[in-house]
Image (cartoon, helix red, strand yellow):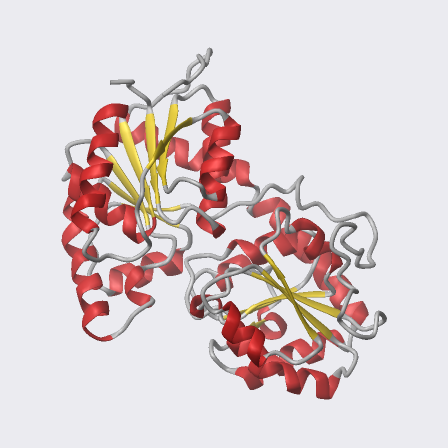
Amino acid sequence: MLSFSVLHAVQPGDGGVARVVVDLVRAQLGAGLRVAVACPPDTPLAEAVRAEGAGLFPWRAGRDPGPRLVRETRELARVIRTVDPVLVHAHSAKAGLCARLALRGRVPTVYQPHAWSFEAVGGTVGALARRWEVWASRWTHRIVCVSAAERRTGEAAGVRAPWSVIHNGVDVARFAPSGTDEPEPDPDTDPDADTGDAAGPIVVCVGRLCRQKGQDVLLAAWPAVLDQVPTARLVLVGEGPDGERLRAAAPPSVRFTGNVDDTAPWYRAADLVVLPSRWEGMALAPLEAMASGRPVVVSDVDGARESLPPGHEPLCLVPSEDPAALAAAVGHLLGRPEQRRALGHEAHEHVLSRFDVRRTGAAVADVYRELAGVQCTEHREPISP
């Protein structure tokens, strides 16, 4: 056994969850902890963990529960025995399911839902997911929610556990504005390519192309946006299971970038960033956009109100799954460049003061210390699993 301080069990290996885990791993390694990560191999997360120098343990788990659940739980249990961690931090529903089944409270266990699984499904499956979360709380030493709204959603579902609310944070240096009020093009991918009039404002949506992120709602709203601002262009950054369907429904003024290595240039290329999610805990993309000095329009799901600067709600918050309201908000801001610039400046200052990733890392470290006495050391030895 290798005896690490912390094991992060993670599924999925991409998207916002992966970015949160990489930030935590980087902070924890810098603080002197011995950190290991169990996650699906050949994913952006696995690559980033390897680059950071943490212990990497392949865990071949899919996103959804199913016939492979028993095997996936056994595989994770083997990793836990090998790593022998002082504390396990499970991220998202699948890792939370397998880790808590494998551990059953024998090791201090932190569970971070990153949005509740029962919000993603309805009917019998949703009811089962809700019952599981209630049951598994007995094996959870701390549930970390990324917003107070996410905690309230869990409590309303009957989850009773010790809670900590720790807001997501972003690397404010990485997403710093370019130093000018004007959007700048991405030097590698050229946002003006194949999107029509180069003088038109650019709306950017960053997120996995899936039902959760609501790009279909944005496409439904887009004709009404064009009625107000005919030169507007929309860029969807990301890839996912709904990509083919969304591309088939998109007009010529919409560009799809696929997955990109760095989203920061796209935020800086945007006049406005939109995320019309159906559910979240607290989405990273709006925080990243605001750190870049860009105003955002977001749907009123968990974490959205907490992420916005005071006074931005009337302009920047719309009901979920409401294309008309979304089009009205987007069209309004696209037609008012001075107001956009003012909102962007306020958003940047707001993220600097409240959502710096270093605050998040310190708050998580406090939870570890409280639960398991995990302390930082003055010297970090190389990790070689």
> In front here: 158 or 266?
266
The number of numbered badges drawn on the structure is: 0
Q: Nearer the viewer, residue 360 or 188?
A: 188
Residue sitting at x 19%, y 68%? 127
Q: Position of residue 369 (x, y in %)?
A: 33, 27
Where the C terminus falls, by quadrant?
Answer: top left
Q: Is residue 185 above or below residue 377?
A: below
Q: Position of residue 137 (x, y in %)?
A: 19, 49
**Quadrant of the image for the N terminus?**
top left
Vertically, is 165 above or below 194? Answer: above
Q: Is residue 318 visible?
A: no
* Left or right of 166 in this view: 83: left
> Quick check: 383 above or below 219?
above
Q: Quadrant of residue 366?
A: top left
Report whether 325 appears left or right of 320: right
Q: Residue at x 52, y 71 (%)?
A: 244
- Residue 282 in the image: state x and y as whole percent: 46, 56
Question: Considering only vertical position in the picture, is 206 above or below 94?
Answer: below
**Is residue 90 in sight in this rendering?**
yes
Question: Residue 360: horizontal and vertical position, in percent?
Answer: 48, 40
Question: Is 188 or 95 nearer to us in this picture?
Answer: 188
Q: Residue drawn at (64%, 56%), measured in percent from left and top? A: 289
Frontmost residue, 158 versus 84: 84
Residue at x-position 52% and y-position 68%: 243
